[in-house]
Image: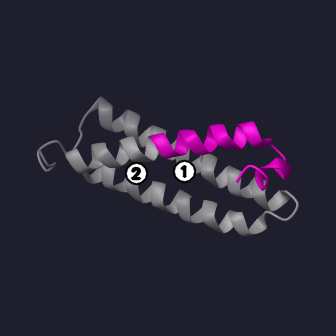
Amino acid sequence: MPDAIENVVLGPRVVQIIAGFSLVVAVVGAFFAWRGIAGAKRLITTLALSAAAGSTVALGIFFILSDGLAPFAVLMAQSALSIAMICRAALKSSSKEGRR
């Protein structure tokens, strides 16, 4: 939605970078949580997922601050919650429990 994000306080390019980062991290994190991870890979994955959830919340806050984009903050809140749930699944998974 290029015309909708033109009015964001951060600028459209930053919104695209944050959204792309969150998307990639969520997909990779979901795959790792599904397969099962342990050790340093789990730590890195959960830190990246936490950063993605936090940046998504920040993006929602900037949507609230922007003119007329407050409804998109609800979508960002739902996305941040979903990423946090993937993070929780990654924390609970282990390489022995994962699918092979």
Is residue 21 one of those drawn in magenta? yes
Q: Is residue 79 left or right of residue 7?
A: left
Q: Is residue 83 left or right of residue 40?
A: right
User: Residue at the location (69% across, 63% down)?
Assistant: 73
Q: Amino acid at mark 1?
A: Ala
Q: Position of residue 67 (x, y in %)?
A: 88, 60
Q: Is residue 75 left or right of residue 35?
A: right
Point out the residue furthest to the right here.
67
- 89 and 60: which one is in front? 60
Identify the mark at residue 73; answer none if there is no mark: none
Is 86 rendered above or below residue 37? below
Is 19 rendered above or below residue 73? above
Disc 1 crowd rating (10 Å Cα; few below 14, some 14-19, many 20+) is: many
Is 78 rendered above or below residue 50? below
Q: Position of residue 8 (x, y in %)?
A: 82, 50
Picture quadrant of residue 40 = top left
Q: Secondary structure at mark 2?
A: helix
Q: Which residues are magenta?
A: 1-24
User: Residue at the location (29% across, 48% down)?
Assistant: 33
Is residue 55 one of those drawn in magenta? no
Q: Identify residue for label 1.
A: 53
Q: Are marks 1 and 2 in contact (CB under 8 Å)?
A: yes
Q: Secondary structure at mark 1?
A: helix
Q: Position of residue 11 (x, y in %)?
A: 80, 41
**Magenta stretch: dominant secondary structure:** helix
Q: Earlier in the sequence, mark 1 or mark 2?
A: 1
User: Residue at the location (39% across, 33% down)?
Assistant: 44
Total numbered labels: 2
User: Residue at the location (64% across, 37% down)?
Assistant: 17
Identify the mark at residue 87; answer none if there is no mark: 2
Picture quadrant of residue 100 = top left
